[in-house]
Image (cartoon, grey):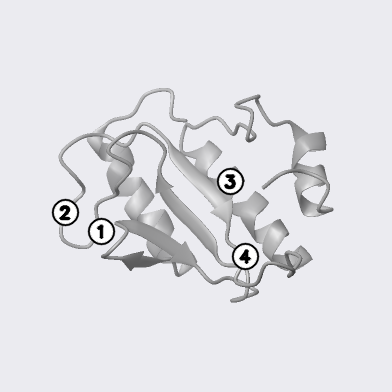
Amino acid sequence: MFDEPDMALNQRLGVLLASTGAVYEVRSKAFTLAGDSPRNPIHIANAYPPGTLPSFNQDDGAAPIKGLALKMLKKRGSSTPNKLQLARLVSLTREMTRLGGKAVDAEKQPLNEDGFQAVISGKARV
């Protein structure tokens, strides 16, 4: 969640997502980041209704992005997330917080360093 969303933040988000190699999915209007493990891509979506993101290539959207939802997708039901991909998820989350955001867990509780380490070790819900 971003404390002070504005259109300049949208531009910075676009630059950040492009620099990570995230790919815009036209159908879902969200981004996917294959990262270190394509079997567990990171899904990046707008956390607030309508739940869609602009492509940032053609436009920065009509309204400021108030928050993003980052989650790991499982390609196979039994596959466990790759530790490198979990570390990439945490790294991306930290980059988002540097843009002025707050990181929260699945229960909307603020994440601290212990929470980030729990994600990387696979002991947190992602």
Q: What residue type is labelled 2?
A: Asp
Which residue corresponds to mark 2? 59
Q: What residue type is labelled 4?
A: Lys
The answer to whether residue 11 is above or below residue 47 is: below
Q: In this view, does 48 lie to the left or right of 85?
A: left
Q: In this view, does 64 lie to the left or right of 48?
A: left
Q: Which residue is drawn at 44% across and 41% down?
A: 68
Q: What residue type is labelled 3?
A: Thr
Q: Is mark 2 on a helix, strand or loop?
A: loop
Sooner in the amino-acid sequence: mark 3 or mark 1: 1
Sooner in the amino-acid sequence: mark 2 or mark 3: 2
Q: Which mark is residue 93?
A: 3
Which residue corresponds to mark 1? 55
Q: In which quarter of the image is residue 117?
A: top right
Report x, y in % for residue 90: 66, 50
Q: Is mark 4 on a helix, strand or loop?
A: loop
